[in-house]
Image (cartoon, grey):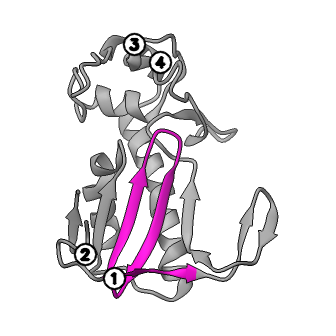
Amino acid sequence: AARVAGVENALTLDMGGTSTDVCLIRGGEAERSAEREVAGFPLRLPMVDLQTVGAGGGSIVWRDAGGAVRVGPKSAGADPGPACYGRGGTRPTVTDANLVLGRLPETLASGLRLDRAAAERALGGLEPEAVIRSVNAEMVRAVRLVSIERGHDPRGLTLVAFGGAGPLHACELADELELHSVLVP
């Protein structure tokens, strides 16, 4: 999508149900790394330098010992899924917060009707704005890992946001990182 749009330098953001994958694109090519840790084991092969964080639409929201709102890495998965799916999920998720904030329509393109009351019940005393701030902070951390911590200044890059929830968070992330544009394929 970036190449078709004439974008040579970008950050990709693929936010799905359980995680978000971030990658730096320079000169039309994904950055590579020589090693990576997989399931706690070092893997030394050339591969795309991809950073994954447990922050997706179905990521479960919780409070840590200090009372701070945290997101993931546990997920509600597809079944039962977020409480708002109406399939028996009861734990608060990022999708529930997005629905309560009016960032999602009550009926998705697939025809699935989202249950706002169930989302509100699941969130309980959690403020949906705090949930969004927390998940965005996790994604900003991932972007910094593939850019700033590798010696690349992300300012001015285009954020290419996709996945089920990526576009919902893209503009806030672009503002935080001083990116000049957002592309949603």
Mark 4, residue position = 122
Q: Callout 3: 10 Å neighbours few (<14), some, many (20+)?
A: many
Q: Amino acid at mark 4?
A: Ala
Marks 2 and 3, the one that precedes in the sequence: 2
Mark 2, residue position = 3
State yes or no: discs 4 and 3 in contact (Cβ < 8 Å): yes
Q: CA distance from mark 2 to mark 1?
A: 7 Å
Q: CA distance from mark 4 to mark 3?
A: 6 Å
Q: Amino acid at mark 3?
A: Ala
Q: Callout 2: 10 Å neighbours few (<14), some, many (20+)?
A: few
Above or below: residue 92 compared with residue 12: above
> Picture coordinates of residue 49 (x, y %)?
56, 74
Mark 1, residue position = 28
Q: Amino acid at mark 2?
A: Arg
State yes or no: discs 2 and 4 in contact (Cβ < 8 Å): no
Answer left or right for 14 relative to 184: right
Q: Secondary structure at mark 3?
A: helix
Mark 3, residue position = 118
Q: Amino acid at mark 1?
A: Gly
> Of discs 2 and 4, which sits in the foreground?
2
Marks 1 and 3, the one that precedes in the sequence: 1
Q: CA distance from mark 2 to mark 3?
A: 41 Å
